[in-house]
Image (cartoon, rainbow, N blue to C red):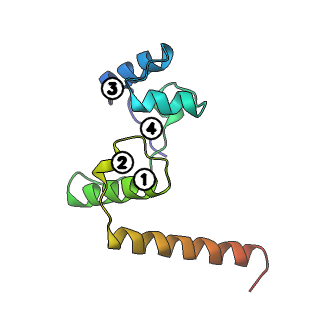
Amino acid sequence: MSRLPDEICRTDRTEHYRDFKHNNAKSKFATHLLENQHSIGKINDIMEILHITKNGRAMDTIERNHIYKETKNGTQTNDKNTVNPNRIYETIMQGEANRMRLRNRTNSGQT
């Protein structure tokens, strides 16, 4: 896994950290951390790279799909009203769920 430099999102991270430290509900990210008893720290320690791609349409699509999936799962911390129903993303999510079920059945010895 690649490491991200600490300079990335320094301003946002500083604001989130301040809100987290002072139990301030201004930052939805800090509120999520507090409500779910997550820790806060260096970006390399608390974040995970999900995809590596160049800027552009592919990155935008991957990001939108991830936000859509997290919103449907109830784990998205941003404004839920920014996500509209999307049949393509629904199809992708159903395919992922089917693959997981098949993988679990195969791993447990069921056929």
Mark 3–mark 4 distance (CA, rounded to whole Å): 18 Å
Residue receiving disc 2: 80
Q: Secondary structure at mark 2?
A: helix
Residue receiving disc 3: 12
Mark drawn on residue 100 = none
Residue 7, position as x, y percentages in the image: 33, 25
Q: Earlier in the sequence, mark 3 or mark 2?
A: 3
Quarter of the figure with the C terminus: bottom right
Marks 1/2 in contact by CB < 8 Å: the verdict is yes
Q: Residue furthest bottom?
A: 111
- The label nearer to you, 3 versus 2, is 2
Mark 3–mark 2 distance (CA, rounded to whole Å): 20 Å
Mark 4–mark 2 distance (CA, rounded to whole Å): 29 Å
Whether 64 is drawn above or below 90: the answer is above
Marks 3/2 in contact by CB < 8 Å: the verdict is no
Q: Amino acid at mark 3?
A: Asp
**Front residue of 25 and 103:** 25
Q: Earlier in the sequence, mark 4 or mark 2?
A: 4
Q: Amino acid at mark 1?
A: Thr
Q: Amino acid at mark 4?
A: Arg
- The label nearer to you, 3 versus 1, is 1
Mark drawn on residue 71 = 1
Q: Secondary structure at mark 1?
A: helix
Residue receiving disc 4: 3
Q: Residue furthest right?
A: 109
Q: Secondary structure at mark 3?
A: helix
Mark 2 crowdedness (10 Å alpha carbons): few <14, some 14-19, many ≥20? some
Mark 3–mark 1 distance (CA, rounded to whole Å): 21 Å
